[in-house]
Image (cartoon, helix red, strand yellow):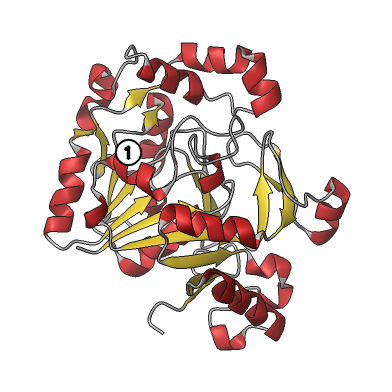
Amino acid sequence: MPCLVTVGGFYGDEGKGKIIAYLAKKDNPAVAVRGGVGPNAGHTFTFEGKEYKVRMLPSAVLNPTTRLLVGAGVLVNPQVLIDEIAKFHSDDRTFVDSQCGIIEQIHIERDIGEDYLKSKVGTTGTGTGPANADRALRRLKLARDIPELSLYMEDVSNSVNYALHNNETVIVEGTQGTYLSLFHGGYPYVTSSDVTASGICSHIGIGPKRVDEILVVFKAYVTRVGGGPLENELSEEEARKRGWIEHGSVTGRRRRAAPFDMELAKKAIRLNSATQVAVTKLDVIFPKSAGLREYTKLPEDAKKFIENVEGETGLKVTLIGTGREVYDVIDRRSS
């Protein structure tokens, strides 16, 4: 029953896509399944010099033998999904739960036109929040109501549980980050659903006893887009000086930046019952780490950073991202 749930530990943008793309190539999972909110979050990864972005499909898409599933709790924009299926030639292995909610144009218009959501909360304008509101009011269309999606219908919960029953490897992919959770984040500057490990499992329909490992992903510094507090936030000038300027993969907005927050990290581990940690973009903080794939070759200051994370959190840092490429990873799981 090898099931790994992967979640973001901060405010999203932690590099989950790159970590999942690496695990998909390295571990060859039978199934990768998306939980989370919807196309308001994008995952980015680079393979052999080419950058890829996904908003609906799991980031395991580059493994041609992995079945790609989207759980019932995920909101689907049909056009975004169909475009990604065509782009990655995955029509024969992509399946969507029939009870996924559907984002329509009216939801996008409401999202863009809502001054409070746009100006204060900092919504992405993808229609996600209004669609989830309609779902709560029980008036949202579901995937089973959309003829264009009929070829991709499946009971995802049954499929995932069947795979686990047969001891197949399953990667569960969360989106966004712990502190954007509707229930556990800094309300109202949150997304419209729970994106902790418990929420992600609920989205795809597996019980907690089915999970073997929970991997929480942290970036070596903290970023967030939109409104809301950010402890020790750097000025744009200082962030640029440090090379920490980034932009969101869906909206293109500049991400605000701050140093690694150990207290946030420890709380995220508690909220998610994490069993292991991944740290990404170590090379941004410690440039001499760039491209390294062996822990022993890391510079001493980078090792001390990792050891401090382990000492403070009590968990092993099993995966360390050292560059943009999928395989720019130090994999310490076997040790």
In terms of depth relative to the viewer, which is nearer, 182 or 66?
Answer: 182
Count of number-bearing discs: 1
In terms of depth relative to the viewer, which is nearer, 143 or 2?
Answer: 2
Q: In this view of the protein, can residue 70 be seen by the observer?
A: no
In terms of depth relative to the viewer, which is nearer, 300 or 249?
Answer: 300
Residue 79 place in picture, x, y as percent: 41, 25
Instruction: State the residue lying farthest toward the bottom.
Output: 296
> In this figure, which residue is indicated by the disc labeled 1?
203
User: Which residue lies at the image location 63% right of the left edge and 83% below the top edge?
Assistant: 298
User: Which residue lies at the image location 44% right of the left edge and 42% below the top edge?
Assistant: 195
The quadrant where residue 71 appears: top left
Q: Look at the picture and state if 75 lies above or below 245.
A: above
Tell me the element at label 1. helix
User: Which residue lies at the image location 53% right of the left edge and 54% below the top edge?
Assistant: 9
User: Which residue lies at the image location 81% right of the left edge and 60% below the top edge?
Assistant: 242
Residue 64 place in picture, x, y as percent: 30, 55
